[in-house]
Each structure stands twice: as structure tokens, then as C-alpha cells.
């Protein structure tokens, strides 16, 4: 591409990369634009040719709102990662974009002092905190004596629209911080993001939630509103209710293998910031060319997976098992289009054909990619006996005595075998914790398993990790009340695999309905709301709450007027339109009238859970549409990885002499 | 002419009667100047003659003090006063001056009085005479210099010393003195002026200094932070200078009595008028941006009157006198002339006023005004006349609105507005906002022009100042109610808050008792949700009312404002509570870290013990910073198993082997509770393992054992020992198995894998003779991994399960054996499986044949 730099305004206004948000129930593009504008504003606040120094953990997040050309248009000449090394740059300005962590402050101080010591004193420095500036960090900078050199600011990049119904804070490690370290900083960020969302889309009238942290978020949100009152909620609410759900209420679901297309893709190849990172051949389906030496790692390619890809949008929520048939049907349709070539006789027919051909051609390309991806996943899952067996174990554990395939004892010995064979630790712990949370472990089993884990994975890897799992309640020596929970919420459907009519969210895990989503489903449907779940929630050791946020009087009036005018306009138009039109309009209205509920997962959500919520939104009988917000998209492995603690064993062998 | 239009003439005559025509504008229209009486002065016994008198623009206050340079003090012990008056001459405050000799006084843009002393001390006071701050503006390495001349400007001060260095403090909010360098002159400069940074090209302060080398070789030297440039003018020395309010023009008065105007960058000279006066004027100022005025006060003229000379750009001039001494203040649109008796405002007559009230004016606005008067007089021709204005009508309306804003006279304001209102009715479309806004502005202006308030702002001044700053000025005059009403009137929520907070701060300083103050302050401030109680509390704290501060701070809704102040007041416990309840971990950190510094360990631990949130955060923070701290806390608080985990962490970080073992022992003690027996056992295991590993490292001479898991230790023990010591290795492995109670299954699996990895196929076959708790399929599979077909085939003998056998044959691609075995077992599914996996057509056919036989 040419070295031309886009004009600033054009660069900011560029909505490319945001097309997949166009149909969102609320205007998510504006949220993305807001983030871009803020970014450019902060870049403009530091004059001169800039070196942008990024906290590595932010790069994926930043990539979702801004592309390199935007940064270039605003004077960024170089992009560096903030590392433990001097920063070599000839730029006259350095802009740091970092999370407010003291560790990073020290790195910044080192770099700035490095420049000063080297006599390079003319540089301007900007430090921008994502998403908030903290006194603690300021204190470190001031203790290190560089405070005066820096221009400090905030970049409130919080909820990033990932899809038209999905927002994420993209904060890793929240579960660990909140539940293990007792550091609720992330909850503060969640509350702030909700306050911002409400200034954009109006105060959300109904707020409810389950779990200790959900309660805390609401309290914070409420407090923030009181701290800065005034008329910032000057919009008629677009979102009707907010459900805050604490991940700790349902730790079982993430431990199960997700069986939707998107979920399984995430399990097998991993989806990060909407991208998968796979070998070229996985996408193209071509076998690797033999010319390149087989010893070197095959080149990996990043591939964007989001709603922009219309086929993906259509199939990502489907059970993986049914994917093959659908892709097959699609292929047939495309072939049919190609076949029409021979029917085209006249020029205009040909033209028409060419149009169809073009769309079919793009569809074809997308289709081919997904066929290849699905094949890749299939190979590693359903075609692999070990995977299938493991699924049976998982299902047996969640289904309890209802399972027919195997007994709990068989499951226990399977987990035992995994550890014995030193299968990857995450895999073993995933099943072990699942075992503990569903079937339960008695003291003897508990101690035995722990000993085995230490023996197999070593003291370094296992000791602290086990303590962590115990601290968050994923591994404990006690009976579990899972059977009761499963029973009262109908979490297991035995014949799900056979039944073709998928009328329950249990399609996401081949028979198991995700607990978190079931809770939302039941509480939304029940007249008494969350109170209908009192008994189950007691078993889960989770409290619930429901609050009404009162709208300012002026907004209430405006909402009333808007409601009236919309109904007035429909009645008038109904009189003049034909019957079929009326029907269509009616349907649209039904659709339109569906109340919007924002479900905010504190500590992460899985793709399968998102799929389940999409299913609920689209179900005809439902009167709500759901949008999902989360601190991060997770799966069992990433959740566990946060809790696994590896402490490298420092050793001075010379101290062994006398032994 | 009708009698009605005669009436109009009379009005016009009375309005324009004292206008003086001086030159014309660039369209050739004559320009007029007028003097408007504003206030009769309220002051008595004021000495304007032997004093320094400085008045602030925007109808600002007047400060007066005895000029030590003008009068030799009769009495050495005499301490002068500084008195501050408002624009009507009402005294606001007075205070004795006991610092050094005053060289210069002036007002900053936020109406703070800046007093410069010869010893380089600068003192700043507010309107109430309260001391704000002092600083030394000495910017030299050469000590002992005295300031001989200084100038205060909007945001700073500039000065010249007796060694002719130029010093400057560009920002009074952050007073850091800068030296602009030394002037290359031998005699004391005649005068100086400053161009404020907001008017210069590179936003730097420019100091203009008039210097003379001899009687008729004068010049102006421009000093900036970067350099000093002599303009080398070789002109008659300049005794007085004045910079226009937009910083663009410089007016000078030289020793030959000429008034000259040039650009401040000296690129062009405009006016030059010989006044014929040898005596320099006492003050020179600008009539807005339009003309220059010079004042020879009565003490200079040595007459009972002072003389004012006004010079227009055209060089045309006018002069007049007034009783007694006086002074001048440049305003953005005119000049304020202050005498003992009155304050008048000299301005170029605004265009709208000229158009309407100039005698014989036929401009649309004048026509509209006439038509309105006809209407008032019930004349029939009125409507016809309005219609005649045609397309210019909306302009005429706007002009009448503008004229209303330009007048001090209430009656004229009303008339102009009525005319505008009348004309508006004939307009197809007129933006009503303009009219409404002007009415609002005039209500505010008339209120503040009231002599009781004494802020004689014109409409252009009001616009330049902004309502926001106006509110600040009223607050500074403690006119809270008026400020509050104005905020409400123009609907500025922020302004209301500001007023209330300032009012509350003033209340806090009063002598009423704390409870009473709290009560009235809370009552008033609660009207404004979100208002800053912290600011008020801070004031209370600073005036020494700590209890009051705490009480007020409790009402502050923003924890981020509350907590730092509580810490400052050493209300640590409350700070902690507020921080925790805010949910803002940053605040909790700040409090906790500050407590850790200020409190004894014991106290601090007690606090942590009682506050889970504080404890969690503190421990999470210290885990990285200071692990010893954690250890201390755990042992004090009896959190034994946490201490144990910490010991484990330290175990990893410690490099010394002895220390390591000790730490494990210590951890084990921490796991004394019954429910933690598993953990205690793990410590025993690890201690034992370490011993074994050290042993193994010695045996094998390979430093690879420490840090391995038990499984890996067994594995490596077998692999690492040379083949001839295999039996020894197996013995060690057996020991490990016993010591750590490794389950038979797992041990078999590890040992089997290790034998394969060591390539000890003989050993593997031998091991397979023992009964294997994991069966023999894994043996075959593992051998296959190393492509040992031969061994694998041998081991097949031990595999009994037919399905397993077929699967293994398939893995080995021994199709014939697989088919035979499957056929022998009559298992069509297995045959199908073979068929699917096999690529050899011959065997495929064989499968089919076999399958057919079953059918």
C-alpha cells in the first residue's frame, strides 16, 4: 500500500471494522466511535512525532477499536511494547498506554530515567491509563521522581463491542483477582462501564443479579450515580433490564466442553479477541507443501471470526454435530447457482446470473473456509475416541445417577488415569474440579487426588495451584448438592442427542443446559423473578437481588410520549396497508417490542453460554432479547490457567556441597 | 416635518449632543467619541496625588497606597496602608503594609492585587485584603539586586533590577522566576511595558523597556525568555508607553512631547502627534483598540484641573479637563477615567448607536426607531414606515437590540428594546433568542452596575469577561446572593455550585459555632446534589476547625475527594471506612499504604485484622513488595496455613538448600490442623523427595533431578543411569515407589515409559512378564511410538482382549493379522473399522469378503 496517510477526520470516521455492529439492538457503533475519538484526542494531546508504547495485554483490545492507519494519521510513527528494557526511539514524543499496575510504572520510570541519563532530555512523555488513573500509580511515579516529566491522563476504553449482541471489557484474570486475591478492582471497572453505558443508552430501569460480586457491582453503580448526579442520564432508556451474574455462581458450565461450533472452535484452536491463529493449511484445506522442510513450524495465520462473516454468524451457535449437514446444504445451494449458468440465454439473464454468481462466489469462499475449519475440529474431537470418551465422562458427571453410559466410579478412575498418565495439567484439573463440583469428593478421595496431582505434576506446579482451587471452591472435600440443583432446574436432558427439535438451551452441551443461562431463563419467565429460584440459589450459596432504578421525571414523560406516538403511528398505518403488510409489520413490532436485557457476566462467559442466550432471544415465545456483556470471554482451560500457579524453583547447587 | 419626527430629533440631539467627531473609519463614515458619566465617587479624603493608584479593568477595584518615591516620608517609622476600593469608590478593605518598599502594584486577571517590593518580594492579596501568597522573584545568580521597576500583567509580573537584569514570573499560580538576561545599558530605563503571553506570537512574555543612551538617543529593548533585542530606534527617549488591550499596538510619549502609535513588533508606525508638552503625562491608556488617551494629572499640570488628551488614529484629537487629580484604566472598548468626584467612561460611540441616534440618520435602524416612536405616538404612518425598511428590517431589529446593550441609560435601553420588539413583529422570521438573550444580559448588567455592587461593565466587556468569570468576581466581593441569582437566571448549574461552595467557605471562616455552621451549610448545599463538601471541609481544616471539617466531610458524596482529606487530617480510621465503602480499591490502597507508614506494626496489623478488604488488598500488594511483611502478619494473626503457603512460596525463591528444607519444615508446622493433614504430608513428601533427588544427582552426575515431580524423578532415574547400572536404577525406582506410595498402576506406567525411553527393550520385555495392572496394550503402543515393531509384536502375546488386539494390529498396519483376528472373533464392526482405515485394496477386498460371510 502507498505510504499516504489518511486525513485525520477520515481516519476517525472510518467505520470499517465495525460493520458487523450495524444491526445491534443499541447503537454499538457509537460506542466504538466513542472509543476511537477518545484515543485520537489523547494522541493529539501530546505534540510531535510519537512512539506509542503499549502494555502488551492491551494490544488485542486496542486492535478491536483502532487500526494502525488510524494511529498513523495521528502522528504515531512507531509502536513498541512496554518491556523490561530501555526504549530506543528517535521520536520526540512517547505515549504510554498502560493498565494502572505499579509494576508497569516502574518500567516506565526506568525508561524515562534512561533517556535522561543518556542526555536525551527533550522528549515529551504522555502516560495514559486504561481505563483509569490511580493514585497508587501516581505515587509510584512520584516516588521514582519522574512524575513531573509526564503528562498523565486516562483512556476509558472499557466495554468493547465484539458483536452486535456482545460487549467485553477484555480484562483477563478478573475471576482470579476477585475470588482468589480479594482484589475487587475489576468490579469497579465493571461499574464504571455500566455507568458509561447508561449515559449513552439511558438508565436501565430494572437491575437484578446473583452472587456476592453482582451485589457489589450494583452497590458501586448506585454509589457512582449518587457521587455525580446531574442530568447525564438524559436519554430514554433503550435497555429495559440488567442482570448481573457472578461467575462463581456457576463454575460447572465452563468446565464442560462446549459443543457449539464457536465453542468447540474456542476449545480446540482458541479464539482470542475475535481472532483464531491457525496454520495456513487448516484454512485452505490444502496439504502442506513438501518443499518447505518438515522440521520447521508451519506458518500460522490470523483469521478474523465475527459477525462480518455472514455464514459464520449463521452457524456459529449450532451444535457442532449438526454443522456438517448444514454446510452440505449450503454447498448444494451454491452449486445450484453455478448450474444456472446454462439456463441463462439472453444478455440480461446473463447479467442477472453474473450478479448471483458473484455472491455465490464469495459465499463459496467463506463456506470452503468453514468446511476446512470444521474438518480440522472434527478430527480433533468427534473423530477422536479419547475425546468422545471424555465427553461421556463429563456428561456422566453432570447427569449424575441419571447417566446411563457409565458409573461415577468409572469417571473417578478415568480422572485418576489422566493424572497417572500425566496428561496436560489443565485437562486433568478440569475434570477433577468438575468431579468435585458435581459428584463431590470425600476427604479420603480429596487427599488422595491432591497427592497424585503433586506427584504427577510436581511440587512447583501443583502445590499453590491446588490451594488456589480450594480457595475458590472448585476443589473441596465435601459432598455436593449438584444433584438437587440439576434436578430442580432440569439441567440434563437425556435424549438431547436424538431429539432433532432443539427447543431447549441444552443443545449447547449435548444435553446439559448451562446453569447460568438456565437461571436467567427461569428468573425472567417467572412472575416472582429471582425469588422463584430461592431454593436453588440457597444450594448454590448465592444471594440474589432486584432493584428498580427510578428514571428522572422528565425522562419518564418522554418515554411515555414516545410510547404513545409509536403505537399511534402503527394504528394509522395499519388502516391503509394490505393484510400481508400488516402481518409483516406485526411481526416486526413483536420483534421490536421485545424488551432488551443486558446480561453482564462478572468473571467471564463462554461462547456456549452466549449461544444459549442468543437462542433464548430468538425463541418465538420469548418477550426479551439479550445482549451479553462480560469481563472476558473464557473457557474452562483459560479459567484454570488463571488459577494455575507455577513457581520456578530457584536453586543454588553449590549449597549442596555438605550434603 | 411632523411634530413627531421633531420629537425624535430632540431625542437624537440629546443622545448625540456631546459626541465628538474624530476622523473617520475605513468606510469613510465619521467616527465619534463620547464620555458617559458612570458613578459619582463615594470616597472621601482620598489622596490620588501622592499615591500609587492602580485600577483593574472590567470595572475592577482600585488599590491605593502611599508612593514612597513621590514623597520623602516625614517620619521613618510611618507604615503606609493599602486601601482597596470598588469602582464607585466604596472601600472594600484596608490593611497596613509592613513589608518592603513598594515598587509597583497591579491586578492579575483574577483580581488579585500583586505587590512588588524592591527586595524582590512579591505579595499577593485578594480583594478583601487577605494575604494569598508571597514569593521571591529573584531569578539571578548574582545576589543582592534591587528591583527598580516592575509591571504586573494578566498572569504574571516582570521586573528590571538595579543591575539591569530582566526578571519575570510568567505564571502567578506557579511562581517560578525566570531571568530574561541582562540589558546592555548604563542608565536606569525610563519605563517599561509587558505584552502578555496570550497576545504574542510564540505565547511567551515580551517585556518592552524604554532606555536612553543620551538626551536624544532613546530606544526600546524587547526582552523575551529566549533573547534580548535592541530595536536601535535612535529616537527621542520614550518616557511613557502603553500597550493596547489586544497587544497589537504600542503608544509612546517621547521627551519631545510626541505621541506615537506603532505595531508592538515595530513593523509600522501610525499616528504621530506633537503635543507641545514637555512634561510627560502621568498616565497613558487606550480607548479600547481605537484611540490613545494621555492624562496630565493636576499635580503635573500644577493647576486645579487635570488635562485629558484623546488622540484618534487619524491624528485628530480632543481635549478636556476635570477637577483635581485622577487616573485612567484601559478597558476592552473604552477607557475609564477616575477622578475624585466621578468615574466617566470614554469610548468610541458604538456603530449601532451612531446609526440610530446620529442626527439625520437614515439607516434602517434609525428608520425602525422612528417608526416605533411614531407607533408610540399613535401615528398612522408607523406601519408604512416599517414596511419601507423592507429586507433590511431584521438587520435593523438586530441593530436596535445591539444599541440597547451599548447604553448605560435604562430609559434608552428600554426604548431600543421596544423598537426592536416592534420591528420583530414585521419580520417573517426572527430568532427570538437574540432578543431574549439581550434582555437577560441587560438585567444582569443593570443589577451589577448598581452603585451598591459597583461593577460598571459594558455589554462588550461582559461578553469578553464571560458570565462565568463575572460570577467569580461577585463571589470574591462576597456578593453570594447576587451571584447565585445570576447563575440561576442564566441556568449555570456549575456556577450555582461554585457560589454555594464559596459562600459555605466564607461561613466556615466566620466565628459561629460548629454545629450551627454545619446545619446552615448542609441545609443550603444539599439543594445541589453532588456539590463539593470536601472543598468546604478543606477550608474548615485550614482555618483550624478540624471538628467542623470532619462533620462537613461526612456529607461529601465523592469518596475520592473525601479520603485524601481525611488522611490529611489524620482521621485514618474514617478514611479507611470511606475508602472501603466506596469500592474504589485505589483509595483503599492509598489509605492502607499511608497507614502502614504512620502506624506501629502492631496497630497496623490490628487494623488489617479487622478489615478484610484492607487486608486482602494490602496482602496482595505486599506479596510482591515485601513477603516478610506477610509472614509477620500471618504469624501474628494465627493464619497458620496461609503462613505455610507463604513459606512454600519462599521455598521456591530461596536458593540455599538448607534454607529450603527449613522452609518446608516451617510450612509443615503451619499445616498442623487436622483438615490440613494432606498438606503436611505433601511437605514430608517434598522433603523426602529433595533428599532422593540430591542423591540421584550424585549417583548420575546429572544436575537434572531437583525440581522434578515424583513421577518424573522415577522416570529420569531409570533413563539417566547407564544401562549397566539399570538394576541399581530400578532399585532406586522401587524405593521411590515405596517411599511415596506411588500407586501400582501409575508406577507401572512410568516405569514402562522410562524403559522405552531408555531403549531398554530387553528390560521392557522382562518387565512385561510381571503382572501389569494397566494391561499390556500401553506397552505395545509405547513400543510402537519408538517404531519397535519387533518388540511390539512380541508383546502382543500378552494382550488378551480381542478388540484391543485388532486395534493394535490396525495401528501396526498389520492388516492380515487384524482381519484374521476380527474374523475369528466374528466381529463385523471391527472388520468395518479395518475396512475404513486400510488403504490397501487387496486387504479391503478381504474385509469385504469376510463381512459378506457374516451376512
Image (cartoon, coloured by chain):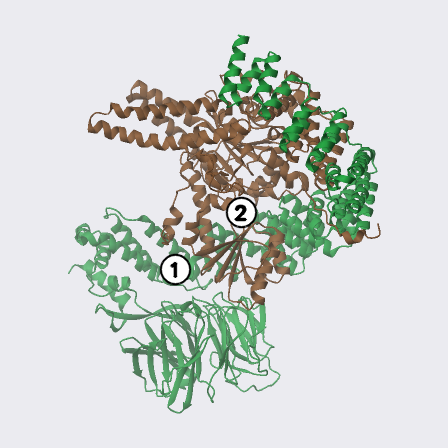
Q: Colour of chain A?
A: brown
**Which of the two residues, A369 or B256, is positioned nearer the viewer here?**
A369
Q: Do the residues labelled 2 and 1 touch (CB within 8 Å)?
A: no
- Measuring 40% from the left and 63% from the top, which residue is drawn there? B457
- Measuring 53% from the left and 47% from the top, which residue is drawn there? A58
> Which residue, as the protein is rendered here, is positioned at the far top?
B855
Q: Where is residue B379 drawn, in percent x and y?
A: 19, 52
Placement of the N terminus of chain B among the 4 image quadrants: bottom left
Q: Where is residue A119 drawn, in percent x and y?
A: 55, 69
> Residue B73, located in which quarter of the rendered image?
bottom right
Residue A58 is tagged as 2
Q: Mark 1, chain letter?
A: B
Which class describes the residues within 10 Å of circle 2: few (<14), some (14-19), or many (20+)? some
Q: Is mark 2 on a helix, strand or loop?
A: helix
Q: Mark 2, chain letter?
A: A
**Which of the two residues, A269 or A15, is positioned nearer the viewer here?**
A269
What residue does disc 1 label? B463
Q: Where is residue B49 drawn, in percent x and y?
A: 47, 81
Q: Where is residue A644 drawn, in percent x and y?
A: 66, 39
Amino acid at each position: 500500500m502507498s505510504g499516504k496517510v489518511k486525513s485525520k477526520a477520515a481516519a476517525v470516521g472510518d467505520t470499517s471494522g465495525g460493520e458487523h455492529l450495524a444491526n445491534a439492538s443499541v447503537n454499538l457503533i457509537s460506542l466504538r466511535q466513542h472509543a476511537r475519538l477518545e484515543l485520537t484526542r489523547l494522541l493529539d494531546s501530546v505534540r510531535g512525532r510519537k512512539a506509542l508504547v503499549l502494555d502488551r495485554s492491551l494490544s488485542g483490545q486496542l486492535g478491536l477499536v483502532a487500526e494502525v492507519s488510524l494511529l498513523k494519521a495521528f502522528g504515531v510513527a512507531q509502536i513498541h511494547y512496554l518491556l523490561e528494557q530501555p526504549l530506543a526511539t528517535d521520536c520526540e514524543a512517547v505515549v504510554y498506554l498502560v493498565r494502572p499496575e505499579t509494576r508497569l510504572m516502574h518500567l516506565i520510570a526506568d525508561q524515562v530515567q534512561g533517556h535522561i541519563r543518556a542526555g536525551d532530555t527533550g522528549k515529551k512523555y504522555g502516560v495514559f491509563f486504561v481505563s483509569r488513573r490511580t493514585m497508587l500509580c501516581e505515587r509510584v511515579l512520584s516516588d521514582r521522581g519522574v512524575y513531573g516529566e509526564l503528562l498523565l491522563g486516562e483512556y476509558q476504553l472499557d466495554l468493547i463491542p465484539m458483536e452486535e449482541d456482545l460487549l467485553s471489557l477484555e480484562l483477563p484474570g478478573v475471576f482470579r483477582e476477585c475470588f482468589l486475591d480479594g482484589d475487587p478492582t475489576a468490579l469497579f471497572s465493571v461499574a464504571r462501564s455500566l455507568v458509561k453505558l447508561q449515559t449513552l443508552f439511558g438508565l436501565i430501569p430494572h437491575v437484578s443479579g446473583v452472587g456476592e460480586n453482582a451485589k457489589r457491582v450494583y452497590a458501586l453503580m448506585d454509589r457512582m450515580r449518587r457521587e455525580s448526579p446531574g442530568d447525564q442520564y438524559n436519554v430514554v432508556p433503550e435497555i429495559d433490564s440488567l442482570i448481573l451474574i457472578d461467575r462463581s455462581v456457576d463454575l460447572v458450565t465452563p468446565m464442560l466442553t462446549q459443543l457449539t461450533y464457536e465453542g468447540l472452535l474456542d476449545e480446540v484452536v482458541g479464539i482470542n479477541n475475535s481472532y483464531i491463529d491457525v496454520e495456513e493449511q487448516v484454512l485452505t484445506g490444502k496439504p502442506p507443501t513438501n518443499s518447505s522442510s518438515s522440521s520447521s513450524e508451519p506458518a500460522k495465520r490470523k483469521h478474523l471470526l465475527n459477525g462480518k462473516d455472514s455464514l459464520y454468524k449463521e452457524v456459529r451457535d449450532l451444535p457442532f454435530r449438526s454443522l456438517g449437514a448444514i454446510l452440505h446444504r449450503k454447498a448444494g445451494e451454491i452449486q445450484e447457482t453455478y448450474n444456472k449458468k446454462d439456463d441463462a440465454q439472453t444478455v440480461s439473464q446473463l447479467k442477472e446470473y453474473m450478479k448471483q454468481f458473484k455472491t455465490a462466489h464469495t459465499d463459496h469462499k467463506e463456506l470452503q473456509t468453514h468446511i476446512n475449519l470444521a474438518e480440522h475440529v472434527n478430527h480433533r474431537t468427534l473423530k477422536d475416541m479419547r475425546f468422545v470418551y471424555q465427553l461421556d465422562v463429563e456428561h456422566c458427571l453432570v447427569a449424575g445417577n441419571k447417566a446411563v453410559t457409565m458409573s461415577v466410579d468409572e469417571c473417578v478412575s478415568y480422572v485418576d488415569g489422566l493424572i497417572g498418565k500425566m496428561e496436560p495439567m489443565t485437562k486433568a484439573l478440569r475434570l477433577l474440579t468438575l468431579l468435585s463440583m458435581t459428584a463431590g469428593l470425600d476427604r479420603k478421595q480429596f487427599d488422595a487426588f491432591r497427592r497424585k496431582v503433586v506427584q504427577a505434576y510436581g511440587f512447583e506446579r501443583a502445590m499453590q495451584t491446588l490451594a488456589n482451587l480450594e480457595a475458590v471452591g472448585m476443589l473441596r472435600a465435601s459432598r455436593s448438592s449438584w444433584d438437587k440443583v440439576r434436578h430442580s432446574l432440569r439441567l440434563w436432558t437425556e435424549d438431547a442427542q436424538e431429539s432433532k427439535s432443539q427447543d431447549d438451551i441444552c443443545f449447547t452441551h449435548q444435553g446439559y443446559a448451562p446453569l447460568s443461562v438456565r437461571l436467567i431463563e427461569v428468573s425472567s419467565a417467572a412472575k416472582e423473578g429471582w425469588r422463584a429460584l430461592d431454593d436453588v440459589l440457597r444450594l448454590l450459596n448465592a444471594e440474589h437481588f432486584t432493584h428498580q432504578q427510578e428514571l428522572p421525571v422528565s425522562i419518564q414523560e418522554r418515554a411515555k410520549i414516545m410510547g404513545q406516538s409509536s403505537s399511534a403511528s402503527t394504528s394509522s398505518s395499519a388502516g391503509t396497508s394490505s393484510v400481508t403488510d400488516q402481518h409483516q409489520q406485526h411481526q416486526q413490532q413483536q420483534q421490536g417490542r421485545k424488551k432488551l436485557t443486558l446480561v453482564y457476566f462478572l468473571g467471564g462467559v463462554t461462547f456456549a453460554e452466549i449461544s444459549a442466550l442468543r437462542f433464548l432471544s430468538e425463541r418465538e415465545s420469548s418477550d426479551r432479547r439479550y445482549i451479553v456483556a462480560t469481563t472476558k470471554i473464557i473457557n474452562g482451560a483459560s479459567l484454570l490457567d488463571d488459577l494455575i500457579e507455577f513457581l520456578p524453583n530457584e536453586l543454588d547447587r553449590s549449597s549442596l556441597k555438605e550434603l | 416635518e411632523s411634530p413627531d419626527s421633531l420629537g425624535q430629533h430632540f431625542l437624537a440631539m440629546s443622545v448625540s449632543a456631546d459626541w465628538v467627531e474624530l476622523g473617520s473609519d475605513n468606510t469613510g463614515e465619521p467616527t465619534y467619541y463620547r464620555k458617559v458619566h458612570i458613578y459619582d465617587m463615594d470616597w472621601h479624603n482620598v489622596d490620588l496625588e501622592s499615591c500609587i493608584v492602580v485600577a483593574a479593568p472590567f470595572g475592577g477595584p482600585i488599590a491605593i497606597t502611599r508612593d514612597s518615591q513621590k514623597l520623602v516620608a516625614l517620619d521613618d517609622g510611618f507604615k503606609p496602608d493599602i486601601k482597596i476600593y470598588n469602582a464607585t469608590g466604596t472601600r472594600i478593605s484596608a490593611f497596613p503594609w509592613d513589608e518592603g518598599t513598594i515598587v509597583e502594584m497591579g491586578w492579575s486577571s483574577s483580581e488579585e492585587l500583586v505587590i512588588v517590593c524592591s527586595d524582590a518580594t512579591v505579595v499577593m492579596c485578594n480583594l478583601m485584603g487577605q494575604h494569598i501568597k508571597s514569593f521571591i522573584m529573584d531569578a539571578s545568580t548574582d545576589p543582592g539586586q534591587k528591583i527598580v521597576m516592575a509591571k504586573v500583567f494578566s498572569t504574571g509580573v516582570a521586573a528590571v533590577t538595579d543591575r539591569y537584569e530582566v526578571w519575570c514570573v510568567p505564571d502567578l499560580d506557579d511562581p517560578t522566576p525566570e531571568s530574561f538576561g541582562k540589558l546592555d545599558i548604563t542608565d536606569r530605563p525610563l519605563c517599561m511595558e509587558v505584552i502578555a503571553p496570550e497576545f504574542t506570537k510564540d505565547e511567551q512574555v515580551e517585556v518592552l523597556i524604554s532606555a536612553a543612551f543620551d538626551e536624544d538617543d532613546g530606544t526600546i529593548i524587547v526582552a523575551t525568555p529566549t533573547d534580548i533585542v535592541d530595536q536601535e530606534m535612535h529616537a527621542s527617549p520614550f518616557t511613557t508607553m502603553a500597550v493596547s488591550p489586544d497587544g497589537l499596538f504600542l503608544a509612546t510619549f517621547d521627551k519631545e512631547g510626541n505621541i506615537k502609535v506603532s505595531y508592538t513588533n515595530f513593523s509600522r508606525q501610525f499616528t504621530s502627534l506633537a503635543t507641545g508638552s514637555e512634561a510627560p503625562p502621568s498616565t497613558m491608556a487606550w480607548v479600547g483598540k481605537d484611540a490613545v488617551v494621555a492624562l496630565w494629572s493636576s499635580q503635573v499640570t500644577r493647576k486645579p484641573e487635570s488635562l485629558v488628551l484623546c488622540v484618534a488614529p487619524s491624528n485628530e484629537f480632543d481635549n478636556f479637563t476635570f477637577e483635581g487629580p485622577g487616573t485612567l484604566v484601559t478597558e476592552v472598548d473604552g477607557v475609564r477615567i477616575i477622578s475624585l468626584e466621578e468615574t466617566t467612561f470614554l469610548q468610541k460611540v458604538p456603530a449601532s448607536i451612531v446609526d440610530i441616534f446620529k442626527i439625520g440618520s437614515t439607516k434602517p435602524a434609525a428608520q425602525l426607531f422612528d417608526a416605533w416612536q411614531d407607533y408610540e405616538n399613535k401615528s398612522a404612518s408607523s406601519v408604512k414606515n416599517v414596511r419601507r425598511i423592507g429586507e433590511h428590517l431584521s438587520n435593523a431589529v438586530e441593530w436596535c437590540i445591539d444599541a440597547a446593550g451599548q447604553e448605560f441609560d435604562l430609559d434608552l435601553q428600554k426604548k431600543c428594546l421596544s423598537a426592536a420588539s416592534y420591528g420583530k413583529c414585521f419580520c417573517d422570521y426572527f430568532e427570538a433568542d437574540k432578543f431574549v438573550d439581550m434582555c437577560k444580559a441587560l438585567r444582569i448588567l443593570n443589577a451589577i452596575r448598581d452603585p451598591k455592587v459597583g461593577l460598571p461593565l459594558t455589554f462588550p466587556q461582559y461578553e469578553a469577561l464571560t458570565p462565568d468569570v463575572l460570577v467569580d468576581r461577585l463571589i470574591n466581593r462576597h456578593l453570594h446572593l447576587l451571584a447565585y441569582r445570576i447563575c440561576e437566571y442564566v441556568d449555570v448549574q456549575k456556577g450555582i455550585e461554585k457560589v454555594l461552595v464559596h459562600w459555605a467557605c466564607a461561613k466556615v471562616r466566620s466565628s459561629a459555632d460548629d454545629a450551627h455552621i454545619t446545619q446552615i451549610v448542609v441545609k443550603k448545599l444539599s439543594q445541589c446534589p453532588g456539590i463539593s463538601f470536601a472543598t468546604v471541609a478543606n477550608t474548615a481544616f485550614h482555618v483550624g476547625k478540624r471538628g467542623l471539617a470532619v462533620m462537613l466531610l461526612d456529607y461529601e458524596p465523592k469518596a475520592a475527594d473525601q479520603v485524601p482529606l481525611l488522611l490529611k487530617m489524620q482521621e485514618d480510621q474514617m478514611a479507611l471506612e470511606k475508602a472501603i465503602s466506596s469500592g474504589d480499591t485505589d483509595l483503599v490502597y492509598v489509605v492502607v499504604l499511608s497507614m502502614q507508614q504512620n502506624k506501629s506494626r502492631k496497630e497496623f496489623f490490628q487494623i488489617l485484622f479487622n478489615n478484610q478488604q484492607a487486608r486482602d488488598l494490602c496482602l496482595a500488594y505486599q506479596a510482591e513488595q515485601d513477603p516478610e511483611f506477610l509472614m509477620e502478619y500471618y504469624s501474628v494473626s494465627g493464619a497458620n496455613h496461609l503462613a505455610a503457603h507463604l513459606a512454600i512460596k519462599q521455598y521456591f525463591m530461596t536458593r540455599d538448600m538448607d534454607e529450603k528444607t527449613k522452609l518446608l519444615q516451617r510450612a509443615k508446622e503451619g499445616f498442623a490442623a487436622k483438615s490440613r493433614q494432606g498438606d503436611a504430608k505433601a511437605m514430608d513428601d517434598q522433603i523426602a523427595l529433595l533428599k532422593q533427588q540430591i542423591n540421584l544427582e550424585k549417583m548420575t552426575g546429572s544436575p537434572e533431578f531437583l525440581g522434578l515431580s515424583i513421577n518424573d524423578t522415577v522416570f529420569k532415574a531409570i533413563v539417566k543411569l547407564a544401562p549397566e547400572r539399570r538394576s541399581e536404577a530400578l532399585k532406586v525406582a522401587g524405593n521411590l515407589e515405596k517411599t511415596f506410595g506411588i500407586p501400582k498402576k501409575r508406577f507401572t506406567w512410568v516405569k514402562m515409559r522410562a524403559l522405552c525411553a531408555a531403549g531398554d527393550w530387553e528390560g521392557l520385555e522382562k518387565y512385561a512378564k510381571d503382572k501389569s495392572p494397566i494391561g499390556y496394550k500401553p506397552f505395545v503402543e509405547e513400543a510402537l511410538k519408538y517404531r519397535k515393531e519387533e518388540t511390539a509384536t512380541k508383546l502382543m502375546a500378552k494382550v488378551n482382549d480381542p478388540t484391543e488386539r485388532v486395534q493394535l494390529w490396525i495401528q501396526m498396519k498389520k492388516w492380515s493379522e487384524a482381519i484374521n483376528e476380527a474374523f475369528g472373533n466374528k466381529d463385523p464392526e471391527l472388520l468395518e473399522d479395518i475396512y475404513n482405515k486400510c488403504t490397501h485394496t487387496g486387504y479391503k477386498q478381504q474385509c469385504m469378503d469376510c463381512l459378506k460371510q457374516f451376512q
